[in-house]
Image: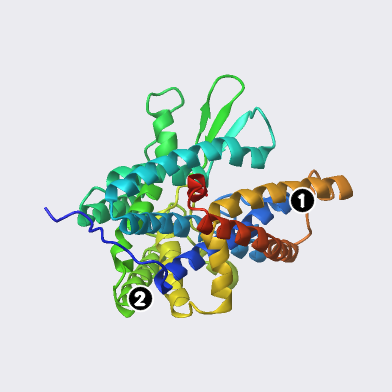
Amino acid sequence: MSSPLPIAPLGAGGARLRSIDALRGLVIVIMLLDHVRETFFLHHQVSDPMDVSATDPALFFSRLLAHLCAPVFVFLTGLSAWLYGARTGSRGAAAVFLAKRGLFLVLLEVVVVNFAWTFQFPPSVVYLQVIWVIGLSMLALAALLWLPRAALIAVGALLVAGHNALDGVHFAVGEAMYVPWAVLHDRGWIELGDTLRLRTSYPLLPWIGVIALGYAAGPWFRQGVDAALRQRRLWAVGVAAIMGFVALRVLNGYGQAQPWAVQDDALHTTMSFLNITKYPPSLMFLLLTLGLGLCLLVLIERVQSAAWVRVLCVFGAAPMFFYLLHLYVLKALYLAGVAIRGLNQGKYFGVDGMAGIWLIALLLAAALYWPVRRFGRLKAERRDLFWLKYL
């Protein structure tokens, strides 16, 4: 049996760490764009997978861009967990931190995040979304990180590549496996009495695979590893993943339930080709998004002194604070819009086109930069406040 993942003390700083923060910052700013869409464009809500024949290209590609967010963030969560263990010199410390923070995130999703979306207390519906699945993935990783690195990679790859083989497995409401399977693989409703329902929006299995692969990539970021070697490895894996996506998609093969087809023009044919499933994330979805994410990580590390990288690092250094803040700011803005302008889009308040969505997102990102920066500095300076590290 090969030895477990090596843990060695890690020095602070470095381009490799700045690139991680910057990429995390990039995807949460993209997430902001998608949540602005979900707030001010409800009159053009998009199903998943998107209907290529009925979706405006500007809306389609904006939604497609947001597909990067969850896979990259979960992968970086696993990578950051390895770095935490390396910094403390203890795999046990990493496992304990993952377990505590995982439980914290599950509670945060149910109590704080869900209220930001519904503004209903007590809730009649609890949406178990990305924070919930990150929390559960962290709990799973707390157990998996004790595996040898080769075994951890095998588990991660099996879950990412193999979960689509389970697409035909379903359980009816009332069967013993219905609730566990709704959490692990099928999106579904879980009834808790007559007044409360849970919606499992993010099936768990493939996300455990993603966080495990992120953790397994950790040794490439160890202090002293040659930057050029790390970048070649990341680039090779990223390009291979993208090529794998293209090959499988051209063949309409395994890893994506909805086939693509030639449309009336090249633009809509491209949209059909890129119409990949997020719930649960198909193999093709993860190949494309993680492949692009790894390539972006390399590119950011190579230009890590650029001003825009430093700006993204501010968002990436305090992602949970940004996440919670932007949800409540968006809710406040929506309620203010309704109060001032009324329901100007049928039964919703919103803007007329995606240009307005992009403008709101850019303005909001600029406005939130300063409180996020201040919180990030507080988090770095007040090591005595242990709860800050959970945000």
N-terminal label among 1 and 2: 2
Q: Quadrant of residue 263?
A: bottom right
| x and y, in percent, of residue 111 in the image | 58, 35
Q: Which residue is mark 1?
A: 333
- Taking the spot 28% from the left edge, 51% from the top edge, the residue there is 90
Coordinates of residue 282 in the picture (x, y in percent): 42, 53
Classify 98 as above or below 87: above
Q: State the residue in front, 22 or 202.
A: 22
For residue 231, which numbered disc appears in the image? 2
Seen from the viewer's position, the closer of residues 37 and 93 is: 93
The kind of residue on which mark 2 rests is Gln
For this rendering, which residue is in front, 264 or 378? 378
Which residue is rendered at x = 53% and y = 23% of the image? 192
Q: Is residue 115 above or below residue 68?
A: above
Tell me the SS state at disc 2. Answer: helix
Q: How is the image coloured?
A: rainbow
Q: Residue 272's x, y, as percent? A: 53, 63
* For residue 383, side relative to residue 181 (left or right): right
User: Looking at the image, is 163 positioned above or below residue 198?
Assistant: below
